Image (cartoon, grey):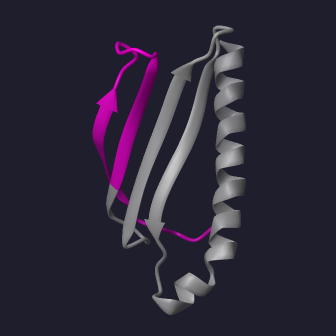
Amino acid sequence: MGLPQSWKVVVKEVVDFSGTPAKAHILDVAEEGPFPIWRHLHEFWAAPDGTTGLVDRVEFLPPGGLLGVLLLPFIRKVFENMFRARHAATRKIFESS
């Protein structure tokens, strides 16, 4: 959103593709940041056509108490746009290599 922010995010869990079915994930949790609670799960899976699927799941508590709750529709829209752009950039990187 263009506002300076400070985050301290710790990777809590990494699971690789060695299990069955072929799925993997990375879980990061913010210990410090603008949100009182922030958990971000990056899920990957091997698709039958040889590509890799990616889904981001975010659990968060908005800042600002009641005002933050009232702003949830706006916050969700910002996240939707941000993750759409991140997924497009990730796809571009992997398709070029």
Whole-percent x and y of residue 71?
Answer: 63, 81
Question: In this view of the protein, which residue sits in the foreground, 25 or 11?
Answer: 25
Residue occupying the point 69% across, 9% down: 49
Question: In this view of the protein, which residue sits in the foreground, 74 or 1?
Answer: 74
Vertical position of residue 1 compared to residue 56: above or below? below
**Farthest residue, direction front:** 21
Instruction: Report the quarter where the C terminus lies.
Output: top right
The image quadrant of residue 35 is bottom left
Label total for image: 0
Magenta run includes residue 86: no
Q: Is residue 1 visible?
A: no
Instruction: Report the quarter where the N terminus lies.
Output: bottom right
Whole-percent x and y of residue 50?
Answer: 64, 8
Residue occupying the point 52% across, 48% down: 57
The image quadrant of residue 21 is top left
Magenta run includes residue 27: yes
Whole-percent x and y of residue 91?
Answer: 69, 27
Region rendered in magenta = 1-29
Residue occupying the point 71% across, 65% down: 77
